[in-house]
Image: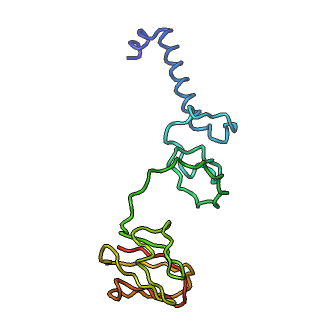
Amino acid sequence: MLDSLRHRLSYANVVASLALFVALGGTGYAAVTITGKNVKDGTLTGKDIKNSSVASADIKNGSLLTQDFKAGQLPAGAPGAPGQPGQRGAPGDKGDPGEPGSARAYAFVNSDGSVDETRSKGVADANVAGVGNSYCFTGLAFTPRNVVVTPLESYRDFMVEMGVCQFRVVLSAANGFMVSID
């Protein structure tokens, strides 16, 4: 058997076998003997590291920055303090006219019972009789259902009585008021 092996053995076969042995042996030796301690800091790049081979335990705490993460990977932090208010914006365009109000009549009544007809609609001096702090409304062209009174001095108390006259406004003191009638 050794004779048949010698007969087939040529110089090329010996050199090829020796080259294969050296190549495999050198790679195996390097894999076993070269560790992370033998690699200089900063010499490995992302291309040198196999994907998913670096785990959380391999990364020093606090060494990663926000830009090292994709959008949405980091939780939001606590809200910061509010900023300074901005400058006032330019005024907007004039709006469209509003719908007419639902009041059938309204009046600005002076403390003497006279009606300021420039600030009134559907109520005239003839419709109001004022005596002291009591103002009786009569002769309106409709039957009042709802009356809203706004005294000119907001601290004044008032009362509205329906059915007396058409309605009567009684203030705690003689005072002017606005009345809206529906």
Q: Quadrant of the C terminus?
A: bottom left
Left/right of residue 79 with respect to residue 150 in the rendered view: right
Q: Is residue 173 above or below residue 151?
A: below
Left/right of residue 134 with respect to residue 154 in the rendered view: left
Across and down, in percent, residue 2 comes to 41, 16
Across and down, in percent, residue 162 comes to 34, 86
> Which residue is pictured at 47% across the width and 85% down the height?
130
Q: Is residue 108 above or below residue 40?
A: below
Residue farthest toward the left in the current orientation of the protein:
143
Along the line of sight, the residue nearer the viewer: 29 or 110:
110
Give the image's coloring scheme. rainbow
Along the line of sight, the residue nearer the viewer: 81 or 61:
81
Along the line of sight, the residue nearer the viewer: 24 or 6:
24
Q: Quadrant of the N terminus?
A: top left
Left/right of residue 4 with respect to residue 54 in the rendered view: left
Task: Name the quadrant containing residue 44.
Answer: top right
